[in-house]
Every structure is written in structure tokens, then in C-alpha cells.
Image (spheres, rainbow, N blue to C red):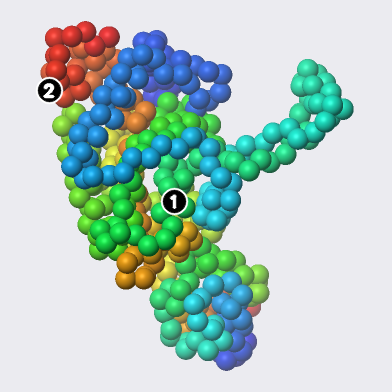
């Protein structure tokens, strides 16, 4: 009897065999090879080109976040299962000895760890909202960032990582400005991914909220069409993978962090993020593991100046 | 439970859990709770508190903004769930 290979494992193994990803012991955590990174940087560069006339402010944050920001944002109300907090050692000599002994004897060592003031960044845009506090300029604000994010969802599926990079844009303004910006980017995202030979389509989506209350949040999100995703078939035609996510928060962050329009009302926000590793994996899966063999229009979009140069 | 007592019990839960921008006890039965400042997260807390108070479990089909959008809609759902109890 033959069994069908698991498409998730098959794609993972193929990416590993070409050196595109480097196993690192834990599901959803892996290194990235040079060619993988080259494609990722070039794709990120295409996003910069698309956005270059928008006049966004660039911000860069480390992959950790003030714990109070996570708590205030109500992230733990929605996604307690995905969050990761940083713990560390606060004790003295004797406790260090106990911790050391526990580690070397293979016993749990969490009793000697306490929560620190930082958590792993759960979404690229979270560090931005506190910095927008106060009155926005007339035209609102637009922020551009690329951050590492963490999600506690170990998986054998190479497109479902625990740590990955998101190129994200945040718009804070009045509701009509924010929605118009989101809709324009939905079209831009579809055009960009389609131009790279990917079968991209957009859909109303929901976040993976936790528990029974989460089902209600998801229903509410879907009813109000607050989240869209651009999906591409990567592992299966019937279950396309989200490469890009658009979230309209209404006044959620504006209310929590005191962001106001010049008219004095609570500002609205939206964000959109491209999962960079997912975009790269979608390209490898669709066009093959060797970029030099990709269809010329796709290859030349990513390597425009030296199409004859070696890609890998 | 008679209608009035049920409405008062719902108002008390809204006061404690809905984080409204207005006084929950003075709400009309048909006031739009989301327009009165209830967030989606607050509506989840309202749902869980109602389940505890009335000893019911809202099925998925009732977990909508419409059902939790006003006191009279919440009462209608609770009456359906407690019918025959």
C-alpha cells in the first residue's frame, strides 16, 4: 500500500534540500539560506517601490515589545494562545545553583524564572500605536516598518512559522481616509503578487481568536468585513495560504492609546502586512526551487538590472 | 422570569461588563449597544456574564452583533434559551 506524501512535509523537505531553509530543532523555527534571503530582500524592495510615493515614515523596532502595550491592546483577550512573554532570572547565588542543577538534571527550570517587562512582538504594528498618541496632523500618519513577530503555533507546515518577518504599513487618520487607503493597497497587493505569477485573490477573513468568545469576535469581524487577506495556493488549491493581511481596527487602538484627529475625535487605524517568508515560499513552490529557472518576467521583476547575472 | 425583571438583570450585566459611554441603567430596550460604546471584546464579556447569570449557553448561531445589539434582542435570545426550563 502506498501513502500520499504529506504536502507540508514534502515542501519543507524540498526547501531544506536546496538550502533555502535550515532546520533549527523546533517546529516553525528555521534558518534562512542565502538564496532565500536574496529573494526576500528583493521582494521587500518591490514593496518599497510600490510604496515609494506615499511618503511613509519608516520605523524600526526590536522583536520585543513593552509588556504593558500588549496588556493594554487587549491582545491577551483575543489571542492568549499565540502570545509569548519573556521570562528571566532575578535570583541570587543559591537560586542560580538550583537552576543550574535543574537544567543539568533535565528537570523543569521555570520555577526560577519570572516574567520580565517585555514580550515577543505579536504583530509587526504593535510597537507603533503608542508612538502615535496625541493629535495627528491634518492628513493623518502613515508608518512603514519591517519587524520580526512571534506566534506560539508550532507546526510542521513551512508556511506556518513561530517567528517570521512582516513588512507592514499602518495608517492612522479619519475612518474614510483609512478605509480608502486599505482598499487601494488591496488592489496594489493583488497586482504585485499577480505580476510575480502567483494566483492571488482576496477574501474576507477572520483572525484566529481563542475559544468560544473568540468565535463571537470572529463572527463580528466577518460581519463588519474588518479583515481581508490575499491568498495564494501554496500547499493545496482548496486551502490557499494568506500572504498578505489587511486589518481595519476602527477606533480600537485610537481609543486605547489616545490617538486623535485634529477635529478632536478618536482616530481610526488600519494596518496591512506582507508575510515575507510566506511570499518567498509561495514563489519557490509555484516556480521551482531555482530562481534562475523561473519564468523570465518573474525573474526579471526581482533581478531587473542584471537579468543575466547568476541568481544562485 | 417576567420581561421587566429580565431587562433589569440584563441592564445590570451591561453596567458591569459592557463598558458603555452612557449609564446602562437608563438605556432604552431598543438602544443600539454598539453605538452606545460597547466594543466587540466587551460584548464577549457580556455574553459570558449572561451565560453565568441565566445558566444558559449561547449557540454559535446566536453569537452575532444583532443578538447582542440591544436589550430587547438579548432578552429574545435568553427567552428562547430558557423556554421550558
Please state the total of marks drawn on the protein image: 2
Q: Is residue B19 above or below residue B59?
A: below
The residue tagged 1 is A131
The residue tagged 2 is A297
Q: Is residue A19 left or right of residue A289?
A: right
At mark 2, the secondary structure is helix
Residue A53 drawn at (x, y percent): 18, 42
Which quarter of the figure has residue A252? bottom left
Q: Is residue A118 left or right of residue A304?
A: right
Verify CB contact (< 8 Å) between mark 2 and mark 1.
Answer: no
Q: 10 Å neighbourhood of mark 1: few (<14), some, or many (≥20)?
A: few
Residue A114 drawn at (x, y percent): 72, 39
Q: Earlier in the sequence, mark 2 or mark 1?
A: 1
Chain designation of label 1: A
What residue sits 67% from the left and 36% below the top? A87
Q: Is residue B38 left or right of residue A206?
A: right
Q: Is residue A142 visible?
A: yes
At mark 1, the secondary structure is helix
Amino acid at each position: 500500500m502506498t501513502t500520499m506524501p504529506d504536502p507540508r512535509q514534502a515542501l519543507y523537505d524540498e526547501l531544506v534540500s536546496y538550502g533555502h531553509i535550515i532546520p533549527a530543532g523546533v517546529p516553525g523555527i528555521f534558518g534562512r539560506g542565502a538564496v532565500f534571503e536574496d529573494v526576500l530582500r528583493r521582494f521587500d524592495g518591490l514593496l518599497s517601490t510600490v510604496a515609494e510615493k506615499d511618503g511613509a515614515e519608516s520605523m524600526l523596532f526590536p522583536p520585543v515589545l513593552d509588556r504593558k502595550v500588549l496588556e493594554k491592546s487587549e491582545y491577551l483577550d483575543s489571542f492568549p494562545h499565540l502570545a509569548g512573554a519573556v521570562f528571566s532570572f532575578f535570583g541570587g547565588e543559591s537560586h542560580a545553583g538550583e537552576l543550574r542543577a535543574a537544567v543539568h538534571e533535565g528537570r523543569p527550570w521555570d520555577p526560577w524564572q519570572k516574567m520580565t517587562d517585555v514580550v515577543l512582538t505579536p504583530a509587526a504594528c504593535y510597537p507603533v500605536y503608542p508612538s502615535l498618541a496625541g493629535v495627528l496632523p491634518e492628513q493623518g500618519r502613515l508608518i512603514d516598518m519591517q519587524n520580526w513577530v512571534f506566534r506560539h503555533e508550532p507546526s510542521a507546515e513551512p508556511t506556518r512559522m513561530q517567528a517570521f518577518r512582516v513588512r507592514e504599513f499602518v495608517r492612522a487618520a479619519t475612518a474614510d481616509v483609512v478605509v480608502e487607503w486599505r482598499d487601494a493597497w488591496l488592489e496594489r497587493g493583488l497586482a504585485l503578487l499577480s505580476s510575480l505569477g502567483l494566483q492571488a485573490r482576496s477574501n474576507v477573513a477572520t483572525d484566529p481568536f481563542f475559544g468560544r468568545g473568540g468565535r463571537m469576535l470572529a463572527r463580528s469581524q466577518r460581519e463588519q468585513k474588518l479583515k481581508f487577506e490575499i491568498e495564494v495556493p501554496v500547499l493545496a488549491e482548496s486551502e490557499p495560504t494568506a500572504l498578505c493581511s489587511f486589518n481595519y481596527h476602527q477606533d480600537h487602538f485610537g481609543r486605547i492609546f489616545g490617538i486623535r484627529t485634529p477635529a478632536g475625535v478618536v482616530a481610526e487605524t488600519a494596518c496591512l502586512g506582507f508575510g515575507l517568508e510566506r511570499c518567498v515560499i509561495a514563489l519557490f513552490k509555484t516556480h521551482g526551487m531555482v530562481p534562475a529557472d523561473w519564468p523570465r518576467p518573474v525573474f526579471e521583476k526581482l533581478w531587473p538590472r542584471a537579468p543575466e547575472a547568476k541568481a544562485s | 422570569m417576567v420581561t421587566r425583571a429580565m431587562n433589569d438583570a440584563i441592564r445590570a450585566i451591561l453596567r458591569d461588563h459592557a463598558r458603555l459611554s452612557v449609564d446602562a441603567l437608563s438605556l432604552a430596550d431598543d438602544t443600539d449597544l454598539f453605538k452606545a460604546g460597547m466594543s466587540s471584546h466587551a460584548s464577549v464579556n457580556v455574553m459570558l456574564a449572561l451565560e453565568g447569570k441565566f445558566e444558559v449557553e449561547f449557540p454559535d448561531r446566536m453569537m452575532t452583533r444583532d443578538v447582542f445589539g440591544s436589550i430587547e434582542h438579548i432578552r429574545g435570545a435568553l427567552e428562547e434559551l430558557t423556554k421550558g426550563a
